[in-house]
Amino acid sequence: MVMTLTSNQWHVGIVGYGEVGKILAEDLCRDGIKVSAYDIKLDGDQARPLQEHAAGIGVTLALSSADLATRADLIVSAVTARETVSAAQACAGAMKKSAWFLDFNSASPAAKQRAAKLVNWGGGHYVEGAVMTSVPPYRIKVPLLLGGPAAAELAPLINELGFNAKVASDKLGVSSAVKMCRSIMIKGMEAMVIEAFTTARAYGVEDQVLASLKATFPGIDWEKQGAYFFQRVIEHGRRRAEEVREVAETVREAGLTPWSAQGTAERQAWIADLADQGLFGQKGSEEFARSADWRTEADRILKQIKSAE
């Protein structure tokens, strides 16, 4: 029997207390919904910021994914792409038999299907979710495609909690395929803009390139879009690289060689490596990729390349 509760009765557990997990927790807590969370960083030296954030909004931190699963009516998995299946496995055996598992992660259809088997075998009700755009501007209202046999039942329940979900299919993998194919384009554009703009800057032809792009695509503000792409990849390149590796796997599952996706993953990971080395400054500082001018970051990249020669 599937659990049905009114919104003020839900206990939501969030696995993965990163950017997305924190945003969902903030919005749910603001509406008086009980929230627990767990993140692997709670077991290391990065625990304090998570603990302080949770205490500030009223989130209870669990000792483990299994500990969280024992108390939650709805588990939202918001981990990195490569942890999709392991997060489901960690929760599956401890879930309430009537609880829901909403997989928010950007993983291939096959990965979602593996996660579903684990959760459903444990007695939970798995629903895949595909987040269709960047979460921060929309927060909990980010467009969300649901998939799987239980998706139609879960959609109105989580929409009552504040989500913006609609059902894409009763078959597992369809929602994720939509997300993955979209990411070929979006994450690929990020990588291409960084590569093209930085190369143009190296040759001193960025103004001509931007003018040409504007003439061809007049509806896009390429200065603004370029700055946004640089910012997002510098801040989230590691997570994006992992997602695009899942995208590449999705392409392989379709029988194609993922040349574009593989290159995108390499570029995203390369920027993440530079960010980890402190090239772009520390998050929260004035240096950190918050300028409206992408040229500052391109110049740092070019300087790093020359110093490595």
Image: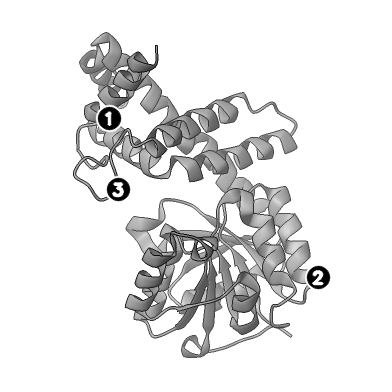
Q: In this view, does 190 lie above or below 66?
A: above
Quadrant containing the C terminus is top left
Q: Which of 216 and 190 is in front in this view?
A: 190
Amino acid type of the residue that numbered disc 2 sits on in the rendered structure:
Trp
Q: Name the residue under label 2.
A: 121
Dividing the picture into quarters, in which one does residue 233 lie?
top left
Residue 262 position, x and y percent, is 59, 28
Q: In this view, does 205 lie above or below 239?
A: above
Amino acid type of the residue that numbered disc 1 sits on in the rendered structure:
Glu
Q: Is mark 3 on a helix, strand or loop?
A: loop
Q: Nearer the viewer, residue 54 or 226?
A: 54
The alpha-carbon separation of the residues under discs 2 and 1 comes to 48 Å
Q: Name the residue under label 1.
A: 297
Residue 143 position, x and y percent, is 46, 59
Which of label 1 and label 3 is nearer to you? 3
Q: Is residue 72 visible?
A: yes
Which of label 3 and label 2 is nearer to you? 3
Q: Earlier in the sequence, mark 3 or mark 2?
A: 2
The alpha-carbon separation of the residues under discs 3 and 2 comes to 41 Å
Identify which residue is drawn at 47% across, 33% down: 268
Q: Earlier in the sequence, mark 2 or mark 1?
A: 2
Residue 97 position, x and y percent, is 73, 82
Residue 16 position, x and y percent, is 52, 63
Left or right of 192? Residue 211 is left
Q: Are marks 1 and 3 in contact (CB under 8 Å)?
A: no
Q: Name the residue under label 3.
A: 283
Which of label 2 and label 1 is nearer to you? 1
Amino acid type of the residue that numbered disc 3 sits on in the rendered structure:
Lys
